[in-house]
Image: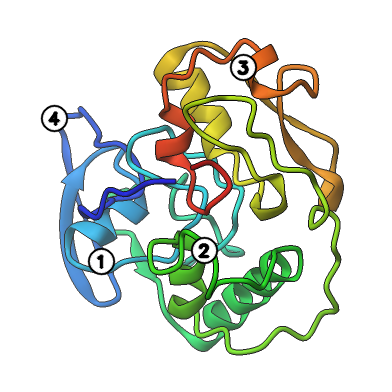
Amino acid sequence: MSINKEQDFGTPASAASQLVTLEIDGFQVTAPAGTSIMRAAASIGIDIPKLCATDSIEPFGSCRLCVVQIEGGRGMPASCTTPVSEGLKVVTQNQKLADVRRGVMELYISDHPLDCLTCSANGDCELQDMAGAVGLREVRYNPIETHLNAAKDESNPYFSFEPSKCIVCSRCVRACEETQGTFALTIDGRGFDSKVSPSQNQPFMDSECVSCGACVQACPTATLM
């Protein structure tokens, strides 16, 4: 789990020299071409809710918390994977977006242990922070319990893996690939049966993991600590 409390801009910086100017929530912002809407918004103090995005790895667009609306555009694109362009007008906050984000967060919480007060990540958990950010106060869905009984893997002497708390954001998988180039982690299964798997469903110590810690740093919950 990450302990870095510095501002996370959501996606890596663009190296482009060309600048574009757009409008986000009525504020004018200038950013390098190729910059994500999420990062451009963060640069002027507008923090769009996110779980799968972090500025240390490339964006993936899987959590659907960071959706926005673009004037003249269709649907609700993910702000982490949508680049800025000249003259774009973006809305990051309105009732429709708020309802969508709360609905998405409800699904995450419905398959997550409700043990925040005793969890080792209490107060330093991005899932907890984002639930508050989107205004989630109650969950309408019955607990799905797909992962709640999954056994904790303590085979690695440097960190533990608690799959019952995993939200399958894939940040650990991408950090393993992009930071270390080890490809020791993968996403196995589909839908609510999806899970992070070390190699071929092996304990961490029997996998190709080299204990670099990139996955632990990337994890937004107490799954990897």
Give above or below for 138 relative to 224: below
Cβ atoms under marks 2 and 3 closer than 8 Å: no
Q: Which residue is mark 4?
A: 17
- Please name whichever residue, 148 or 79, is drawn nearer the observer in this view of the structure: 148
Q: Distance between the Cα atoms at labels 1 and 2? A: 29 Å
Q: Which of labels 1 and 2 is toward the front?
A: 2
- Please name whichever residue, 203 or 179, is drawn nearer the observer in this view of the structure: 203
Q: Which mark is residue 127?
A: 2
**Residue 70 in view:** no
Q: Which mark is residue 184?
A: 3
Crowd around label 4: few <14 · some 14–19 · many ≥20 (10 Å): few
Q: Distance between the Cα atoms at labels 2 and 3? A: 24 Å
The kind of residue tagged 4 is: Ser
Cβ atoms under marks 1 and 4 closer than 8 Å: no
Q: Which of labels 2 and 4 is toward the front?
A: 2
Residue 23: x and y in percent read 25, 66
Chain-order first, disc 1 or disc 2: 1
Dividing the picture into quadrants, the one containing residue 41 is: bottom left
Give above or below for 103 relative to 210: below
Dividing the picture into quadrants, the one containing residue 143 is: bottom right
Q: Which of labels 4 and 3 is toward the front?
A: 3
Residue 222: x and y in percent read 53, 52
Chain-order first, disc 1 or disc 4: 4
Cβ atoms under marks 2 and 4 closer than 8 Å: no
Chain-order first, disc 2 or disc 4: 4
Which secondary structure, mark 2? helix
